[in-house]
Image (cartoon, rainbow, N blue to C red):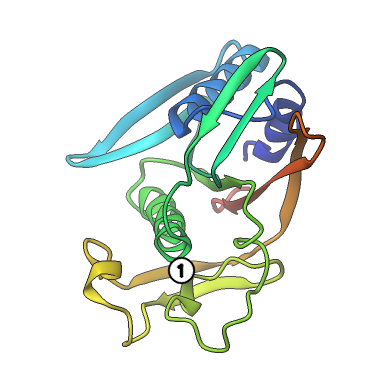
Amino acid sequence: MLDLPSFLDQLGKTRPVFHSEADFQHALAWSIQTDRPMARVRLETRPERGIHLDLLVEDGGRRCAIELKYATRKLDLVVDGERFDLPSRGAHDITRYDFCKDVWRVEKMMRDGYADSGWAVLLTDDGGYWRPGTKADPIDRAFRLYEGRTVTGDLAWDDRAGAGTTRNRADPLQLTGSHVCRWRDYATIRRSSGSAVTFRYLALGVKGATD
């Protein structure tokens, strides 16, 4: 199985922040291809009609499916002379659902024979993803990704979730694997004011039978 966290740890030293999710995808693909020149690294493949996979890495006869999410707070700073003006990217509950769906999709690709292993990755500077939160009974409790939580089984919105939240995301997700959330530091950068911005990532691996 591709050791994706090692690539992310190295990437954080040279690319601590990205302009967009597409920028993140390209940088990671470039890093993997540079390290493994004989591998086939492909962006935005189509496992089936209407479905796009962020990265597919074929190396040594094994195929690894990788889905990436990049969720930032509003951020405006300069790193090594390059300006990054990032908007706030989506609501927490929707992003959590989408990330869990990435895990579900990777599992499905493996069942369908499109990949032998896979990863779902969420990179963010927003602690709201890795902290438990203060609400006793949130509508997205099934999709929470806080440190130490195990994501598994049938995941569905609470009945109180409104149509605006669940639109195009109403389907429950059934995960066959058991995935423990372990967040890792990615990079820390500083604004011109001196205040620190810390990025962390969650990488949930889906192993094949021979991994």
Mark 1 sits on what residue? 176
Instruction: Give 167 or 106, whichever is nearer the viewer.
Output: 167
The reply, left or right, for residue 68 in relation to residue 8 is: left
Residue under the image location 57 percent in, 25 percent down = 84
- Identify whether 193 is placed above or below 141: above
Q: Looking at the image, which residue sits at the far right? A: 194
The part of the image, by quadrant, that contains residue 3 is top right
Q: Position of residue 147 (x, y in %)?
A: 70, 66
- Identify whether 171 is placed above or below 79: below
- Identify whether 3 is placed above or below 31: below
Q: Position of residue 106 (x, y in %)?
A: 43, 50
Residue under the image location 65 percent in, 72 percent down = 149
Residue under the image location 74 percent in, 44 percent down = 198
Total labels drawn = 1
Instruction: Give 116 or 129, whichever is nearer the viewer.
Output: 129
Is disc 1 placed on a helix, strand or loop?
Answer: strand
Q: Looking at the image, which residue sits at the far front? A: 193
Residue under the image location 36 percent in, 78 percent down = 157
Q: Position of residue 33 (x, y in %)?
A: 58, 16
Q: Looking at the image, which residue sits at the far left? A: 49
- Identify whether 47 is placed above or below 151: above
Q: Residues within 10 Å of mark 1 (few under 14, many from 20)?
A: few
Is residue 37 in sight in this rendering? yes
Instruction: Give 75 or 183, whichever is nearer the viewer.
Output: 75
Label 1 is placed on what type of residue?
A: Thr
The reply, left or right, for residue 165 in relation to residue 149 is: left
Quarter placement of the N terminus: top right
Is residue 61 in sight in this rendering? no
The reply, left or right, for residue 163 in relation to residue 131 is: left
